[in-house]
Image: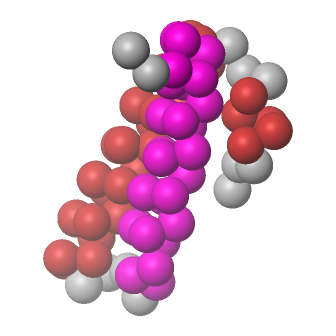
Amino acid sequence: MSKMTELRKLSIDDLKAKSKDLKEDIFKIRMQVFAGSVTDKHAVVSKRRELARAKTALNEKLGGNK
């Protein structure tokens, strides 16, 4: 899990790549949950929170509110 201080140190391109990777991970975990091969259903929740942190850090770098 990434802390906000670690995410704020990343570049914009790194944050975009991390967001994309997290979205893919969430999709894969959800498919495994539906197939019944994953017992840790909380993994989706923790990945979604990490994605939200990455998006927040990205928005801070891009200028915040409009």
Asked if residue 15 can be seen in this view, the reply is: no
Q: What predominant SS class does the magenta segment belong to?
A: helix
Q: Is residue 56 left or right of residue 36?
A: right
* Residue 5 horizontal/vertical position (percent): 81, 39
Q: Which of the 4 image quarters holds residue 14?
A: top right
The residue at the point 53 percent across, 11 percent down is: 62
Work out whether 53 lies above or below 43.
Answer: above
Indicate left or right for 32 with 56 as reference. left
Q: Is residue 20 visible?
A: yes
Query: Which residue, as the protein is rendered here, is positioned at the far left?
Result: 34
Q: Is residue 35 left or right of residue 18?
A: left
Q: Tell me which corner region of the image, top left, top right, bottom left or bottom right, holds residue 66.
A: top left
Whether residue 5 is situated above or below residue 30 in the rendered picture? above
Q: Which residues are magenta?
A: 40-64
Q: Is residue 33 above or below residue 1?
A: below
30 or 2, which is in the foreground?
A: 2
- The residue at the point 41 percent across, 50 percent down is 25
